[in-house]
Amino acid sequence: MIKLTLLFFTFLSLSSFAQYGVSAGLNTLRGFGVDKTFVGFNIGVELPRDYETSLYLKASFYAKSKATPSSGFSVNLEPLDPNNFNLGFVDVLENSYNYTTIEGGVRYYLFDGYDNGFALYGGSNLMGIINRGKRRFSDYDETQYRLPASEKDNGTILALALGFSGGAKYTVPAVGTFFMEASGDYIIIPMASNDAIQQISQSFYSPLLFAFTIGFRKDFY
């Protein structure tokens, strides 16, 4: 995904737009009803169409968060010896989960516009989301048992979301633009790779996501 993002940004920078902005910042993300806050950073490209309107693309990368399963979730083990009829199980001690998002959309500026002074802005976006999850098991006798093939220790969720954002920015001449932004997105299409990620995501997943960003944008002409 990182390679794809870099290639897209390179394509945009070599396009026919006379002006474009490159941004970077820090973000937080939190799902509605979830007590975990994800912290990360973002990089982006913004292409002004005119004084009041721009198109943007932004990629955000969040550090993983960890949680202990509240129900003491356990997994049955398979004996390596077919003559071994003793039941075996292993506890899930910890789940970890992260977010990577790529979003694109349009922004509408009020007051001083895209690249002058103070302005408020808002707009809509389409977001692609990748969640990677992993679970850590308790120790068990690997000479006697193994995890069933159907029980993975990791998984992925791919999702598509729609949302809105709004923010404020201030442009310092010959320096760049400082901005802060809040957004909300609703997941409309989630796709889980296996049962493991569905169990892992119980501590982290929410279809309604809220994010806050502070950052800096530099424009090139």
Image (cartoon, helix red, strand yellow):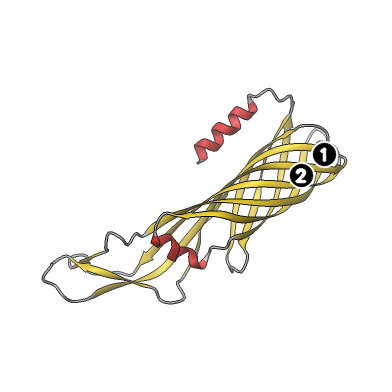
Mark on residue 84?
Answer: none
Q: Position of residue 166 (x, y in %)?
A: 76, 51
Residue at left offset 61%, top offset 49%: 41
Q: Residue furthest front?
A: 188
32 w.r.t. 2: above or below: below
Q: Residue furthest left?
A: 83
Rounded to the nearest whole Å, what is the CA distance between mark 2 and mark 1? Answer: 8 Å
| Residue that carries the numbered disc 2 in the rendered image | 178
> Which quadrant would residue 30 be assigned to in this image?
bottom right
Kind of residue at disc 1 = Val
Dot 1: element: strand
Q: Position of residue 184 (x, y in %)?
A: 68, 56
Tag count: 2
Residue at left offset 30%, top offset 60%: 150
User: In the depicted view, which residue is nearer to us: 86 or 24?
Assistant: 86
Mark on residue 172?
Answer: 1
Dot 2: element: strand
Lower sequence index among marks 2 and 1: 1
Residue at left offset 46%, top offset 61%: 96
CA neighbours of label 2 inside 10 A, class few (<14), some (14 to 19), many (20+): some
Question: Is the Cβ of the residue at disc 2 closer than 8 Å to that at disc 1?
Answer: yes
